[in-house]
């Protein structure tokens, strides 16, 4: 009834096709880990049962994982149209209906060295469904025991560049197949639109960052520019002394302090408060409350890039450091995978577009940030890239400090799942909007 194939996550198209066309049973189980697989009693039977009930072409399930000898629950998340990340976590077990597996394999007409399984599941998703069984049905050993903050940058590690190029090609072909691919054609922007007292504003949203907010504000105030700029600090009801640090800068006329009321704001709401403030500049530039600009030229480089590249958003390059600004692996993150030709399509595959970010204020005001604690900047960047050019700066402009209190330093599996589910939802909405746009142009 079922044939098992052991294939790593990064596997060739040839190996996938070989498995598909050699399978003579009704179902095919692909196991992607190199560790022992053990089933909960009747776990395999349950996966096949749900496959039959649902008519799915692929099923995957929650599971248990042994981490450093301790067995823990490892739930995974539902698959949706926007689940385009090549590192989507299915767990080690993927069970395919062999007819769907063969059909997808027959459409794998490009030979990839690493992206075989990614190509396979996207092609299966084009015609069928991938169903998550939220029951714990098997055991496996988890070898990657790094904290979430250490895993976060794997997809932009320069050592993985060849893999990423293949993944981008697979995703782009998928977008073309489903009608969501956007050609490199952009709307023009009139950067002189509107009256602004300041050419730029450094926006620092914060909550309970007493250890770092002073460093962030000072790095913003130390900028050297040929134009007037200010620093907008938005505090969201801090209780740890952060407000006292902010108020210590009250005598500086460049600092605008916004104290949020007691209603819900999150990071997105704090950004909206800054954007709609009458003293917000023509360009709103990001600086997280626990990070620092790398030098006094960052704000000038931002504005120069907006003008030179005639774009609605600019994304810079950052360096990962510890709290004391010592560089940490993988070091400089420049997102050189972004191209004018295909950047906005590839943006649907990756989990972020880089930092620091700068926004043309009139457009950002018309879009607004989602009022959420996570993914708010990614949502706005996707929306902007749908129609407008995003500029890039490849000089290091920003020190991204990783420390114990950093918001994504060590997340639980439940929190990581919630974050990933939300970003997949953002991608789903964006892909749906792009498909409408493409359809209207036909």
Image (cartoon, rainbow, N blue to C red):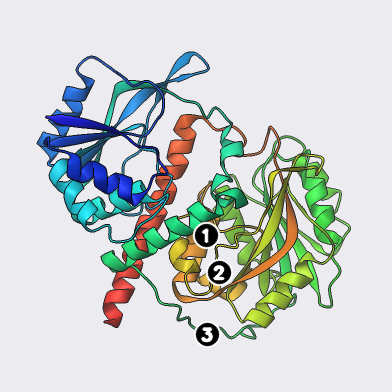
Query: For residue 377, which quarter of the picture?
Result: bottom right
Q: Are marks 1 and 3 in contact (CB under 8 Å)?
A: no
Residue under label 1, please give it: 369
Q: Is residue 166 left or right of residue 145?
A: left
Query: How far apart, in angstroms, are the residues tagged by discs 1 and 2?
Result: 8 Å
Upstream in the sequence, badge 1 or badge 2?
Answer: 2
Callout 1: SS? loop
Rendered residue at 34%/46% (across/down) = 117
Q: Is residue 271 above or below residue 278?
A: above
Q: For the residue carrying disc 3, how many other residues have a C-alpha within 10 Å: few (<14), some (14-19), or many (20+)? A: few
Q: Is residue 300 above or below residue 244?
A: below
Q: Are marks 1 and 2 in contact (CB under 8 Å)?
A: yes
Which mark, residue 364?
2
Query: Measured from the top left, where is residue 208 in percent x and y?
Result: 69, 39
Callout 3: SS? loop
Q: Exactly how many numbered labels are in the figure?
A: 3
Query: Measured from the top left, where is residue 292 in percent x and y?
Result: 77, 52
Q: Is residue 265 above or below residue 386?
A: above
- Which corner quadrant holds the C terminus? bottom left
Q: For the residue carrying disc 1, how many other residues have a C-alpha within 10 Å: few (<14), some (14-19), or many (20+)? A: many
Q: Is residue 183 in view?
A: yes
Query: How far apart, in angstroms, are the residues tagged by discs 1 and 3?
Result: 22 Å
Rendered residue at 84%/54% (across/down) = 218
Q: Is residue 263 in view?
A: no
* Circle nearer the viewer, 3 or 2: 3
Query: Measured from the top left, where is residue 198 in percent x and y?
Result: 75, 75
Upstream in the sequence, badge 1 or badge 3?
Answer: 3
Query: Measured from the top left, where is residue 103 in percent x and y?
Result: 17, 52
- Which corner quadrant holds the N terminus? top left
Q: Is residue 322 left or right of residue 43?
A: right
Residue under label 3, please give it: 188
Q: Is residue 131 left or right of residue 187?
A: left
């Amino acid at each position: 009834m079922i044939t098992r194939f052991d294939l790593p996550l990064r596997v060739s198209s040839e190996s996938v096709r070989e498995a598909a066309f050699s399978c003579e049973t009704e179902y095919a189980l692909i196991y992607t880990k190199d560790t022992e697989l053990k089933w909960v009693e009747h776990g395999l039977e349950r996966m096949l049962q749900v496959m039959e009930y649902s008519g799915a072409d692929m099923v995957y399930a929650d599971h248990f994982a042994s981490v450093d000898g301790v067995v823990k629950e490892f739930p995974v998340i539902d698959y949706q149209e926007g689940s385009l990340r090549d590192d989507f976590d299915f767990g080690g077990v993927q069970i395919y209906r062999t007819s769907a597996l063969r059909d997808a394999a027959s459409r794998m007409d490009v030979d990839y060295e690493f992206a075989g399984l990614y190509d396979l599941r996207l092609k299966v998703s084009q015609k069928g469904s991938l169903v998550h069984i939220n029951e714990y049905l098997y055991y496996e050993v988890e070898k990657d025991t790094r904290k979430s903050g250490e895993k976060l940058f794997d997809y932009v590690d320069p050592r993985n560049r060849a893999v990423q190029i293949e993944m981008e090609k697979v995703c782009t072909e998928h977008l073309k197949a489903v009608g969501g691919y956007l050609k490199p054609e952009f709307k023009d922007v009139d950067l002189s639109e509107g009256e602004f007292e300041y050419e730029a504003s450094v926006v620092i949203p914060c909550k309970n960052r007493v250890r770092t907010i002073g460093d962030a504000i000072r790095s913003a105030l130390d900028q050297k520019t040929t134009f007037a700029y200010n620093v907008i600090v938005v505090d969201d009801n801090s209780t740890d002394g952060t407000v006292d640090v902010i108020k210590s800068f009250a005598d500086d006329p460049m600092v605008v302090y916004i104290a949020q009321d007691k209603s819900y704001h999150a990071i997105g709401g704090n950004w909206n408060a800054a954007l709609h403030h009458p003293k917000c500049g023509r360009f709103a530039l990001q600086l997280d409350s626990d990070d620092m600009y790398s030098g006094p030229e960052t704000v000038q480089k931002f504005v120069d890039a907006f003008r030179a590249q005639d774009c609605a958003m600019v994304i810079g390059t950052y360096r990962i450091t510890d709290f004391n600004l010592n560089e940490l692996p993988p070091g400089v993150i420049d997102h050189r995978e972004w191209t004018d030709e295909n950047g906005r399509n590839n943006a649907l595959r990756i989990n972020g577009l880089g930092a620091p970010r700068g926004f043309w204020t009139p457009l950002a005001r018309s879009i607004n940030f989602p009022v959420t604690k996570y993914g708010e900047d990614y949502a706005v960047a996707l929306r902007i890239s749908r129609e407008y050019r995003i500029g890039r700066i490849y000089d290091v402009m920003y020190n991204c400090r990783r420390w114990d209190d950093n918001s994504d330093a060590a997340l639980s599996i439940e929190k990581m799942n919630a974050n990933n589910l939300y970003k997949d939802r953002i991608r789903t909405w964006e892909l749906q909007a792009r498909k409408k746009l493409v359809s209207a142009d036909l």
